[in-house]
Image: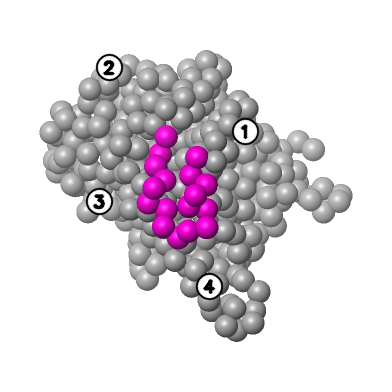
Amino acid sequence: MNKVDNFRLKFSNDNREFVPIMIGGMGVDISTSQLALEAARLGGIGHISDALVTDVSDRKFGTKFVSTKRQEFKESLNSIDKSRISFQEHDIREAMKLHVAKTMEAKRGDGLVFVNCMEKLTMNSPKDTLQYRLNAALDAGIDGITLSAGLHLNSMALMQENKRFHDAKIGIIVSSVRALKPFLQRAKRSNRMPDYIVVEGPLAGGHLGFALENWKEFTLAMIFSEVKQYLADNNLNIPVIPAGGIFTGSDAAAYLANGAGAVQVATRFTVTTECGLPEKVKQDYFRANEEDVEVNTSSPTGYPMRMLSYSPSLGSKIKPNCEALGYLLENGTCSYIDAYEKAKVECSAAGKPLAVYEKTCLCTHMQLFQCYTCGHYVYRLKDTTNKLADGSYQTLSAEHVFLDYQYSTDNKIALPQL
Ligand SMILES: Cc1cc2nc3c(=O)[nH]c(=O)nc-3n(C[C@H](O)[C@H](O)[C@H](O)COP(=O)(O)O)c2cc1C
């Protein structure tokens, strides 16, 4: 009978074998170090994320990066022009060093810990920001980097002087052959192909690599086989890792039997003790019904994003927080600032309290765990655990979910012990 444990993930030029389960990166600190470390301890691959790393460092290590930056750029607090705000190269480096190095020091077991790097987080200086983030992660000893959302064609070149360029694993997330092709062509120039390719389908959580109008026309199975075919046609032997809507061990085993190197999963781990979401939010995920799940354009990145319709980030009135965070600033602007200003005028003219629906301040809402992004099957989470006497759901351990993916058969999901 097919199960995930019948397979192992292997990278080229590497003799090691891994349990073919990768827990996807979930920023901001939803995929915590503890969650990633559990995956590694169990022989698989976990991700931390470098999104808002200064804030993560402040919370975990008591640094003061965010408040210091806010103070430094306070002149623009009441202005819509945020062009003076710049990223703090030293702070990013230090925060990365703390977040990554401390995680790697705590690693046990035969698995790996990677960092998810959303390339769209531009901080008013796309190339420099990226170069610092990527190299700081390598210097701090990360096992691998997964490049996602808004792939920068020069990413490989930005790391090629780093002494760990060939030793760390470097992978990318794509949702089409169209996005894959130019990246591979450019990577050739740095003489460095990615070590793995995550193919993310339209049922994933977080941002989607599809247009709002037509994401329903695609399936993960379809894109997975297109990417496999493209690599075969070009004699490229790179593990392909499907992601998005792989909910049971049997779903995963079917992809592995079809030639996947591993699977990337996330939503089932959002309700584990090790996940960074506050307990209340985990319960909000558990109680989701199918009709509560929506794909919308509230993210200022420009990519559609899947979230729960009762996500507190929707229709909020939070003031742009670019001085403190400012991860999405491009040339001093962010589409949330425009939406906020527009809503102020419209709501005031209509005599209504301020509520911004068009866009959301993703930095602030992700920082506060108020953007309830999730995979399509979030509404099945309640079937993966026990309902307790007080009406709440039992939180799971990451180990339980990981082992359920690894050993389950016949689409069964093992419930945790009460
Ligand atoms: C809460 C949450 C946050 C996510 N954040 C990110 C992120 O920061 N970067 C990223 O590349 N993918 C992100 N994703 C996508 C996952 O890493 C993963 O590829 C996808 O959700 C897998 O599908 P599944 O959730 O159906 O298992 C996120 C997913 C979830 C559920």
Q: Amino acid at mark 2?
A: Lys
Residue under label 1: 59
On the image, the x and y values in percent for residue 83 come to 37, 51
Q: Is residue 268 left or right of residue 216?
A: right
Indicate the secondary structure of the residue bearing disc 1. helix
Q: Which residue is nearer to you in this view: 258 or 9?
A: 9
Q: What residue does disc 3 label?
A: 179
Q: Is residue 144 depicted above or below 289 in this figure?
A: above
If you read the primary sequence from the N terminus, does the residue marked by circle 3 or circle 4 appear first?
A: 3
User: Mark 3 and mark 1: span between their CA atoms?
Assistant: 35 Å
Q: Which stretch is magenta?
A: 72-88
Q: Which residue is mark 2?
A: 163
Marks 4 and 1: in contact by CB < 8 Å?
A: no
Label 3 crowd bin: few (<14), some (14–19), many (20+), radius 10 Å:
some
Q: Are marks 2 and 4 in contact (CB under 8 Å)?
A: no
Q: Position of residue 150 (x, y in %)?
A: 33, 49
| Amino acid on which disc 1 is placed | Arg
Quickly name the residue at label 4. 343
Q: Position of residue 177 (x, y in %)?
A: 24, 51
Mark 3 or 1: the one toward you: 1
Q: Mark 2: give few (<14), some (14-19) or many (20+) Cα within 10 Å.
A: few
* Position above or below: 395 against 331: above
